[in-house]
Image: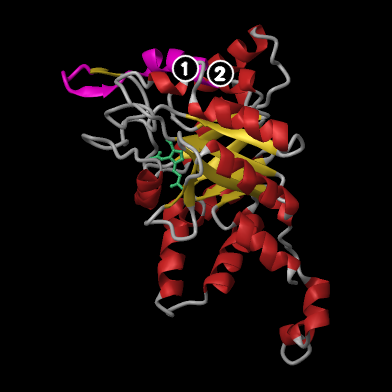
């Protein structure tokens, strides 16, 4: 009914806009992904992800102290082992790099929530997320049930080292239930599982594979990660993970899948996480560096939109910058 209704009335000034704002980002929304490799004194920049680095355990601890100082509640760790083999043994070895990192961080920052990514692809020499066997067609493929055994060992190793939460990102069927059972049997029933439930087979993981040095040496991940075309299937994945005992479910990537996040938020009342992945980061970084876009504004708009879509937690490479930006008002 024009002109009785004028939507612009409440947009007139800063204060009024602040009063009617429906969604607000907070530093406690963020989880910073971090990469750890063997050695000391290392801060090796990741070329495809400007501003991000691979750390050794000592520099990682420094970084965690800085993140904690900014009010960031959590980090998620990815390991880059010294050696890779067919079964990713360095994922669950006693001295696994992620376990060393967890112990050191928990000692220095006991209040920081340390989450670990549980997957095989960083540790296998073929770069796939599990154990390779010939499938029914005789072609090499990731064997689901053999992989479950490896994932369970990895999750237990991380939890035993003191991880506050484990986050399986492999997309094998049944892994949440198996890991839950194993944690409970090992008297770690209080360790929550954040399930990468709706993880799509995405081109947006490109820069990460540089960061984790884990591109698949043959084929791709489509036999285990989801087809970007499917929402119904995402619902089933999420339902199954909840039935199997997931405490938090994740949608990944975030920006191209805001509809999946929204669907999830409308249908479930457990916390929903979204992963603002490496490609979402790298493209805005690249545009920013070229002067085509304002990085800070584009990043904050992205994070706000992910939250508006229904995510309670956002895994993002901007966590540190966003915390500073929020602090600046
Ligand atoms: C491991 C894993 C990946 C990411 C998180 N965990 C890579 C992949 O599945 O290919 C991607 C994160 C990102 O792109 O930022 N499976």
In the image, 67 versus 239, the foreground residue is 67
- State which tag comes first along the sequence, 1 or 2: 1
Q: Is mark 1 within 8 Å of ligand 1?
A: no
Residue 9 screen position, x and y as percent: 78, 87
> Which label belongs to residue 157?
2
Asked if residue 320 is among those painted magenta in the image, a careful observer would answer no
Q: Please indicate whether residue 38 sits to the left or right of residue 238 in the image.
A: left
The residue depicted at 55 percent of the width and 45 percent of the height is 33
- Can residue 264 be seen? no
> Which residue is at the far top?
185
Q: Which span of residues is magenta-colored?
A: 135-156
Q: Is mark 2 within 8 Å of ligand 1?
A: no
Q: Secondary structure at mark 1?
A: loop
Q: Residue furthest front?
A: 41
Along the viewing direction, whichever of 1 and 174 lies nearer the viewer: 174
Residue 20 or 114: which is nearer the viewer?
114
**Looking at the figure, which quarter contains the C terminus?**
bottom right
- Give the residue at x 57% y 71%: 296
Q: Is residue 217 left or right of residue 150?
A: left
Dot 1 and dot 2 residues touching (CB under 8 Å): yes
Classify the position of the N terminus by image quarter: bottom right
- The percent position of residue 209, horizontal first and vertical second, equals 36, 44
């Amino acid at each position: 009914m024009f002109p009785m209704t004028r939507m612009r009335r409440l947009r007139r000034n800063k204060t009024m806009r602040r009063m009617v704002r429906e969604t607000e980002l907070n530093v406690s929304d963020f989880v910073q992904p971090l990469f750890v490799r063997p050695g000391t004194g290392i801060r090796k920049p990741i070329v495809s992800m400007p501003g991000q680095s691979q750390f050794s355990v000592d520099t990682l601890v420094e970084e965690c102290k800085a993140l904690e100082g900014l009010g960031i509640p959590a980090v998620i760790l990815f390991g880059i082992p010294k050696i890779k083999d067919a079964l990713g043994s360095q994922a669950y070895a006693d001295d696994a790099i992620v376990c060393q990192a967890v112990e050191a961080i928990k000692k220095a920052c006991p209040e920081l929530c340390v989450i670990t990514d549980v997957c095989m692809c960083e540790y296998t020499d073929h770069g796939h997320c599990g154990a390779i066997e010939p499938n029914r067609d005789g072609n090499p493929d990731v064997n689901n049930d053999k992989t479950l055994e490896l994932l369970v060992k990895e999750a237990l190793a991380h939890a035993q080292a003191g991880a506050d939460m484990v986050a399986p990102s492999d997309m094998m069927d049944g892994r949440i239930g198996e890991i839950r059972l194993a944690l409970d049997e090992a008297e770690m029933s209080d360790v929550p599982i954040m399930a990468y439930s709706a993880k799509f087979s995405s081109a947006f993981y490109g820069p990460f594979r540089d960061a984790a040095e884990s591109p698949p040496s043959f084929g791709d991940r489509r036999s285990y990660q989801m087809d970007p075309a499917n929402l119904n299937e995402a619902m089933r994945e999420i339902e199954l993970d909840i039935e199997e005992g997931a405490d938090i479910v994740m949608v990944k990537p975030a920006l191209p899948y805001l509809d999946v996040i929204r669907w999830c938020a409308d249908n479930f009342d457990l916390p929903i996480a979204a992963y603002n992945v490496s490609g979402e980061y790298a493209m805005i970084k690249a545009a920013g560096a070229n002067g085509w876009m304002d990085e800070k504004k584009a990043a904050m708009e992205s994070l706000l939109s992910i939250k508006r879509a229904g995510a309670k937690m956002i895994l993002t490479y901007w966590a540190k910058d966003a915390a500073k930006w929020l602090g600046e008002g």
